[in-house]
Amino acid sequence: MSARNGGCAPHPPEFERIHREAAGAGVRCVVGAVLVNPRGEVFLQRRAPHVRLFPGCWDIVGGHVEEGETLCAALAREIEEETGWRLVRVDGMVDVFDWDGGDGERRREIDVLATVEGDLTRPTIEREKFVEARWLDETALRVLAASSTDSGMIDLALRALAGRPAGDPAPPS
């Protein structure tokens, strides 16, 4: 079953409610995944300076939900497009918030902690959208947040790490 048809990893039951409420409010959905490797590091990408939204900012994996997609299917698609990895499961909700990127379109962002599989040492980066990608531990995330002009997604990654249960099984590599 393809991701577009909804065939994706187990996901939180609140996905359907959040998606329905956003549609009722006329808000476009955006999904994001905080990916954590077996060493407890978070995967972040820096957006290219020429992209329309948040140029040069550090970001988690994710993007807009396309017409007819479920939130989970969109998440699986974005992870595959941006890294080449496959979504195994959604491990929990991190945050849900609304924002406007300065283009007049309201968005509802749904960010989750997710487990992926594939060669985590070799992501397939979308070079036209991102200029660099890194696995960062908590200390490196804090240093990056302190030196960044826009630390929103870095702070979100730190919150996701703080919310992970101690001894949480490491995702497969």
Image (tube, rainbow, N blue to C red):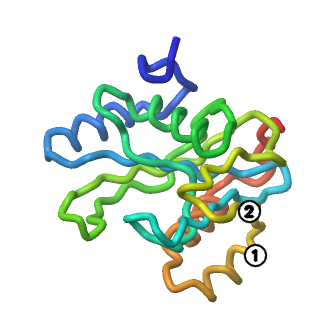
> Where is mark 2, residue-wise?
134
State the residue in front, 86 or 38. Answer: 86
The residue carrying pointer 1 sits among few (fewer than 14), some (14 to 19) or many (20 or more) residues within 10 Å by Cα, namely few
- Residue 117: x and y in percent read 74, 34
State the residue in front, 81 or 12. Answer: 81
Circle number at residue 140: 1
Work out whether 126 lies above or below 137. Answer: above
- Mark 1 in CB contact with mark 2 (< 8 angstroms): yes
- Residue 162: x and y in percent read 65, 64
Say left or right for 116 vs 126.
right
Helix, strand or loop at mark 1: helix
Q: Say what amino acid the circle numbered 2 marks.
A: Arg
Specify which label sits upstream in the sequence, 1 or 2.
2
Say left or right for 17 vs 132.
left
Q: How many labels does the image show?
A: 2
Tell me the residue at 38%/54% (across/down): 96
Tell me the residue at 54%/66% (across/down): 48
Work out whether 105 lies above or below 62. Answer: below
**Comparing labels 1 and 2, the label whose residue is closer to the camera:** 2
The residue carrying pointer 2 sits among few (fewer than 14), some (14 to 19) or many (20 or more) residues within 10 Å by Cα, namely some
- Residue 54: x and y in percent read 43, 69
C-alpha span from label 1 to label 2: 10 Å
Quadrant showing the C terminus: top right
Say left or right for 35 vs 100.
right
Q: Residue furthest top?
A: 1
Helix, strand or loop at mark 2: strand
- Residue 121: x and y in percent read 84, 48
